[in-house]
Each structure stands twice: as C-alpha cells, then as structure tokens.
Image (cartoon, rainbow, N blue to C red):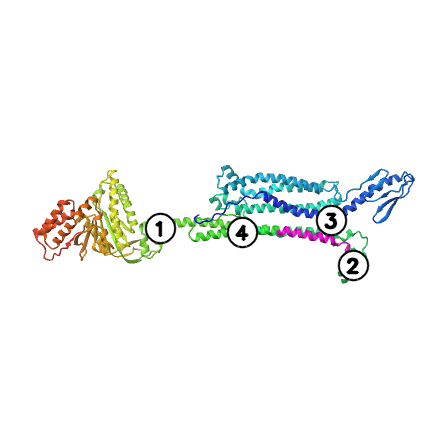
Amino acid sequence: MPGKKYKKVPRYFGLRIYLLSTMMYFFMAFPVAGILLFKYIPDYMTSNRENMIDNTVSPLSRASENFSQDTLLLDHPESDFIHIRISDSMRQSLVINPDTLISQEGIQEPETIGISEDNKIGGTMSLLIRLLLISFILGFAFNLPFKIFFRKKRKGKQIPPKLHKYCRKLLLKTPLINAGILFISYGITIFYMVYILLFEENLDEINRQFYNQFFFISIVSSMLALLFVYFWQKHRVHIKYLEYIFGKEELKRRIFNIKAGRIRNRLWISASMTTLLPLLIVLFYLFLTVTTVKDLNIEELNDDHVSILLGKYNTLDMGFGGKAIANLFYVNVINSLLMFIGIGTGIAVAFMYLLFFVRWTTEDIVYPVKELVKHMQSAGQGDLDNYSIVRTNDEIGELTEGFNEMSEKLKEYIQNIFEINEANSRFVPNQFLEYLGKNSIAEIKLGDQVQKEMTVLFTDIREFTSISEQMTPKENFDFLNNYLGYMEPVISNNNGFIDKFIGDSIMALFPEKAEDALNAAIEMRIKLTEFNHITSQFGKPPIDSGIGIHTGTLMLGIVGGEGRMDGTVISDAVNLTSRVEGLTKLYGSSVIITEDTLIKLSDPSLYNFRFLDIVRVKGKKEAVYIFELIDGEPEHNKNLKMLTKEQFGKAVQLYKKRDFEEALKLFNKIITQNPEDKTISLYIERCRRYIRNGVPPDWDGTEELGFKI
C-alpha cells in the first residue's frame, strides 16, 4: 500500500527456544534434586550404618554358635563399645568402627554414605540428556526449512516452490510440533520414572520416597517447559511470521484449523503459567523442607521438649500435649535454609515466566488491536484497499475478520456508487450538479435552479437526414456514436460539458472562459477531418458540421415531475445559439460566433475572424452581430479567406451604406479569388436584388431572417 512502512523480515527462532526451555527445566528440577539429596543424607547415613552393622555382626553371631563366647568391641556413637562374645580361639581384640572393620579375613570397607546404586536419579537424568540430544536433532531438522525460507526472504532471494509449500503447510502447526518433539524426551523420561516406581523391587523405602518426590517435580517442570515452547513459538508465528508465508486473501480471514478460542481462556492460561504453576513449585519446596516431630525419634515428649517446640506460644496454654505435638511438623535450621533457597528458586522461575508470558500475552492482544485501529483509521480516510491481518483465533481475530469483510463490502459498495455516479454523470454532468450546489445526484430535487453566465456551443451535422436514409437504424446508431465519441472528449478537454445530445446535434456549456468554446470549436473541426478520413476507408461519405457559439446568462435547473426529472438549461441565449448554428448553413461558415462572445475574449487577436453580418433571427426582436471564426476552416479555405479578409470588410461596409453597386464590384473581385466562399455569393445575390428591386425605406443594414434555418 502507498505510504505503508513495511516491517523488516524477522529471523526464525528454533533451537534457541529449545535451549531456553531446557535450561528452565533444569533450573527448576535440579535445585529440588539437590534439596532432596541434602534432606535425605541423614537417612542414608543411618541406613548405611545399620546395614554395615548387620553385615558385620551376622557372621560373627553365626561363628559364636561354634566357639566359646567372649567379647567383640564395636565402636558406636552412643556407647564406648558394643560387647559381642566370641570364642577363645579368636580372642583377639577386634575394634569395629564405621570407617574400618578389622578381622581375620582382612580389611572391609563399609558402604558409601549417600545415594546408593539403588537410587535411579543419575540414570534417569542420563536418559533424559540423551533423549534431549535426539530431540534437538529432530527439532533442528524440522525447523531448518523455515530458517532457510526467512533467510532467503531477508536477502530478497527467490523462494523455491517446494520450500514455500512446506512452510505454508506446517507453519501454523510448528508450536504443537516443536512442543511434541520435546515431549518425546520428557514423556519417555516420565514413563521411565513411572516404571521404576511401580516395578522396581530393589528400590528401598528412602530411595523410593526420594524418587517419588523427584518424579512429581519433573512432571511440573516438564509441563512448564513444554508450554513455554508452545506459547513462545505460537506468539512468533502469529505476530512475526504469518504475513511472509500466506497470501493477502488468506490473511484477511482466520486460517487456523482449530476451534475458535477466547481471550478469557488465554488470560487464564497466562495467569496459571505465571502464578499458579510457579506457586505450586514454591509449595512443593515448602513441603520438602518440613520435618515431622516424629522424625526426632523421641519416644515420649516431656515438658522441656514441648517448650522448645512451641517456644513463646507455650505460655498460652493451648492444650497441646506430647502426643498431639508428635503429629505436627516443625522447621529446623537447615530446613529453613533449604526452604528459602527453594522459595527463591520458585520466585525466580515465576519471574522469568512472568516476563515472557506477560510480554507474549500483551503483544498477542495489543499488537493486533493497534494494527486493526491503524487500518480502521486508514479506511476512515478513504483507503479501503488495505486490510488487517487476522493473527489470532479469538474475539480479536473475529473482529479483525469482520473489519476485513466490512472493508471489502464498503469498497464494493463505494465502487458501485462510484459506477452509478459515473453513469449518472453521463446523463447529468457533474459540473451541472456543482453549479446547483449539490454533491451528488441524490441531493437533486425538483425545482433546483441557479443562474450563471456561460458560453453555449451548438453543433450539428449538415444534411444528416439524407445521409441517414442510406443506412440502417443500427448503422445510424453506430455512426452517430462513433462521431460523438470523437467530439465529446474535445469538449471536456476544454473545460466544457455536454448538456444534451439532440439527435446528431450537441449542446455544450463552457462555464469558465469564452476562449474554451472557441478552442473546442477549432479542435472539433480538426477531429472532423480525422473522422472523415477514417470513415472513408469503409466507404462512408464525408460529413460536414456547423458550430454556433454565443455567450449569455443561463438558468440551470431541474424540470419535470416527481416521477421523471431532467436537468436542463432554460435561456434565450440557448435559443439564439441554436439559431446562430443554423446560420452556418446560410453563410457557408464552419464556426459563427456572436458579438457577445467576441467581447468576452481576453485577447481576440489570438484568433482569426471576420465580421459577417447583422441579423435578426426568427423569434428575436434585437439584431445580433455575427462573426466567422476563420480558424475553424480547412487550411485551404482559411488561407483564401485571410487573403481576402480586408477586401471583404470594405465590401460589407459599402453594402451596409447602401452603396450596392460598389459593393457588388468588390464582391465580384473577391469571388474570382475565392469562388468557394459562400458568404460572397450570398452578398452578391443581395446586392443584385437591392439594385434591381430597390431598398425598403426602413432598411438599416440588418437582415431579417423570418424563417428557421
């Protein structure tokens, strides 16, 4: 569109979306794993110590059945030694501690304190990383054509049809496909964890509890990561990519092959992603960092224990006893530290999601609305060729689609009105409406009128009746339309407009300058020569025309009845112009103008004309001075008339002074030079008549034309 500022072709994002979502997954999952590991270290230490003691004492107990008993000393944190009886034959003091077991069989190392091989976290994460590498490769292969497409688009290179077809087919599906590619990794990992929890028999209770909690945080993290990929890609597709792949007609309507959505649902999703799900992570951290009172392994809580657990609230005598408190939980120093770390991580995740989702949601709503408002403003200024891209599948998309449909219908409607007005202007000229002070023909009403001085031009084909008798009705219409088609542009090009066609006659009005009418008359004569040249090639006889021009005051108005009205010009000037046009036949002139037109010319010297006569036409009381516009004659006739113009003027002067004999001599001399000058022949005939019959007593040089020519 003219004046439209086009956006720069964007870059296509693929792997960076994968990378950022994966980083956010690990950012959410790893701190939880660390907290879980730290939380369960004491349990692992206790469990490993018990296993170590069991594995050590059991063989010795079996040995005591065969040997006499003595005492085996085992280092233990709650007593100096554990006394175990062994036989005299093995009476060697064996000191067993958590670091080294000394026996006759040598040195044995206890199990490592921490996550044993029964814990599957390491294997799970290793599986996830390998699966993510596969997803990255698949994602790269899927998104590469889009990246190539937009790179070529930015550089202005030609897009291969197959590449364009691929991008056009899959662009709207890229959010779901990209999320699905990553779901392969997270989904397989989660199903693997489910399998471990359900079918792994060697998983002890501590590792099972650890693995179970990590499983739930993995589900939440995976869901957040996948939704992050889906909504980021969807945002870029709708806001950045659509207009570079789909065509104008497609973008005017919703092209999303899914059920229409709602802004409300989008806001719910955004709110959930930015508050609810991160809040679940915070709550999860809170539950991870609490310890039940039972975990203190105190068989019976005394008053001192209760006082420590309740603190200053113990003075309120709330009725808590030892058994009631045992079912509650507390937060120790380490748990408090872990809780703050976990909550801080959850807030950081919520903040990152908040930044992204608020931006996406805002742009997905505000950008299409601003774009729509901009195009509405353009439409209001008359630019109905623009359209707004339907970027969403919700109420905004529905509104945009409705605007595009409305814009198209308005364009069609205005185009129809324009065509109707254009058609009406062929019947009622726009200039006619302007002078009546109307903007359109719809405002016209019966009786509208305006008075204005204009120059009127009448033109008529000479002897057309006899010419038309040689043609069929259809040939007559074709001939006239062809002729009028030559003449009409000449009038409009000279600031005039045609008031009406009367058979083979044209009545034109020139509202600005009298020169426009004269220029049009001269050009019409030239066009007539061209017309005759062309029609002669089809065997048609040449035609001639006469043009009469007069300037006077006109009354433009609407006449008729309520059922049928017509715009017309009512004025004595119109009738006089018609009579002047008829005089062209009598005087053999191509163009005759009246004195009223001549005196309106700003510079008469620009034209060649000669005085013809003073006439009083039928229906007029006042005499009219008429002049011949020599410039409208064929070149040969024009040269001869210009050559005899001075002599002709003297002869006419003698004629008006009743010196008919001298005038006759001069006219006879002129006609020898220009025998085709019909005006000279007319004056010679008049001179002879007056010489022969005498002059009426009241004759003043004015010719009385009591007949209509």
Q: Amino acid at mark 1?
A: Asn
Q: Is residue 65 magenta?
A: no
What x and y, as percent, mark residue 633? 21, 46
Determine contact: label 4, label 2, CB under 8 Å: no
Residue at the spot 77% in from the left edge and 47% down from the top edge: 43
Which of these two is toward me, 149 or 483?
149
User: Which residue is tagged 2?
Assistant: 307
User: Which residue is tagged 4?
Assistant: 365
Residue 39: give its label.
3
Determine contact: label 1, label 4, CB under 8 Å: no
User: Which residue is tagged 1?
Assistant: 421
Q: Amino acid at mark 3?
A: Lys
Nearer-N-terminus badge (3/2) = 3
C-alpha separation, residue under disc 1 versus residue under disc 4: 41 Å
Residue 321 makes an appearance in the image: no
Q: Residues within 10 Å of mark 2 (few under 14, many from 20)?
A: some
Q: Amino acid at mark 2?
A: Ser
Determine contact: label 1, label 2, CB under 8 Å: no
Mark 1 lies on a secondary structure that is helix
Image: 111 above or below 650: above
Image: 64 above or below 35: above
Which of these two is toward me, 240 or 170?
240
Nearer-N-terminus badge (1/4) = 4
What x and y, as percent, mark residue 617? 18, 54
C-alpha separation, residue under disc 3 versus residue under disc 2: 25 Å
Determine contact: label 3, label 4, CB under 8 Å: no
The magenta region covers 324-351
C-alpha separation, residue under disc 4 versus residue under disc 2: 57 Å
